[in-house]
Amino acid sequence: MISITACSSTKITKETNSSYVSISGGKSYQIPLKDKKVNYSDEDFKNLYSQYLKSNNITLETSPESDKTGMSKEQQLKYYTVHDITPEEVKKELHCQIFKVNYTCDTFVIYKGKLFPIALGFGGFGVVSLSTCDFDEDGKKDLIYTFSWGSGLHRSHIGIFNLAKEKEEWLDFVQENDDIMVEKISDKSFKIYIANISSQTDSYFTHFTLSKKDNIGNIQKIEGKVKATKTTMK
């Protein structure tokens, strides 16, 4: 079992000669010098998130004070939260922090004084599992993660964020109607499982427990390309 204490507008384009689906539309945010820290608290990120929204001209209800849904005060305080969801091994290997916004399911990576949006969460759980990888074999670890989204059709994907290139790509893989998680075999090999999400707390989408179910695929570097392939079910 893996425990995680843990909607934006995105353009998706298919590259014909690649095993990737390329993602564009997310904008990075340069953290002002006065706000830069070695480690950021949830409250620090909340302030950075407000600045990020403002810099991108995004208007969003971000606090109980601005809520017009009619939720009770207790529900609002639980709903309008942000949390550091960085697994210890990811923080140790990548020297980054990953935060998730409970009320949008958006996820952000803070790395070398910049804030990067990753994945997609609209209508789903957003980022579900996180690990490190090194498919390009440059000796610098990257971030690999699974996430779900979808309005009407729940779908799960696998993303890789190359920290050195500041570039996010999604593997050419989709699982409909289920959440998925990855299990690391090595820096260049992963198994893909259907994920059972349970033990949700009041912070709905940022604190939950994952348990793996069926093995539905594998991720490997084949002929120079990172490929996610589905397992043939018997």
Image (spheres, helix red, strand yellow):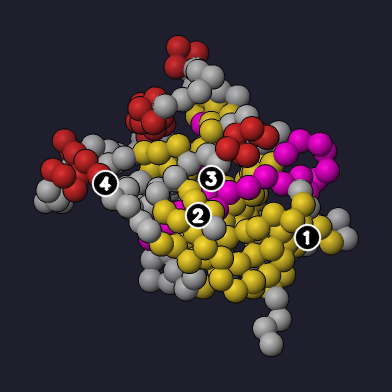
Characterize the local packing of mark 1: few (<14), some (14-19) or many (20 or more) Cα atoms within 10 angstroms. Answer: some
- Residue type at mark 1? Gln
Q: Earlier in the sequence, mark 2 or mark 4?
A: 4
Residues at marks 3 and 2, CA–CA distance in whole angstroms: 12 Å
The numbered disc on residue 79 is 4
Q: Position of residue 163 (x, y in %)?
A: 66, 36
The image quarter in which residue 157 lies: bottom right
Q: Earlier in the sequence, mark 3 or mark 1?
A: 3
- Residue type at mark 4? Tyr
Compared with residue 153, is residue 93 higher up or lower down, i.e. above or below? above
Compared with residue 31, is residue 198 higher up or lower down, i.e. above or below? below
Residues at marks 1 and 2, CA–CA distance in whole angstroms: 20 Å
Q: Nearer the viewer, mark 3 or mark 2?
A: 2
Instruction: Give yes or no for residue 123 being in the magenta stretch.
Output: yes
Q: Nearer the viewer, residue 113 or 15?
A: 113
Q: Earlier in the sequence, mark 1 or mark 2?
A: 2
Q: Are marks 1 and 2 in contact (CB under 8 Å)?
A: no
Q: Earlier in the sequence, mark 4 or mark 3?
A: 4
Assign a secondary structure to mark 1.
strand
- The residue indicated by pointer 1 is 220
16 left or right of 222 in image:
left
**Residue ranking furthest to the bottom:** 234
The numbered disc on residue 128 is 2
- Residue type at mark 3? Ile
Characterize the local packing of mark 4: few (<14), some (14-19) or many (20 or more) Cα atoms within 10 angstroms. Answer: many
- The residue indicated by pointer 3 is 118
Instruction: Give yes or no for residue 185 being in the magenta stretch.
Output: no
Please provide the residue range marked out in magenta.
115-141
Q: Earlier in the sequence, mark 3 or mark 2?
A: 3
Residues at marks 1 and 4, CA–CA distance in whole angstroms: 38 Å
Residues at marks 3 and 1, CA–CA distance in whole angstroms: 22 Å
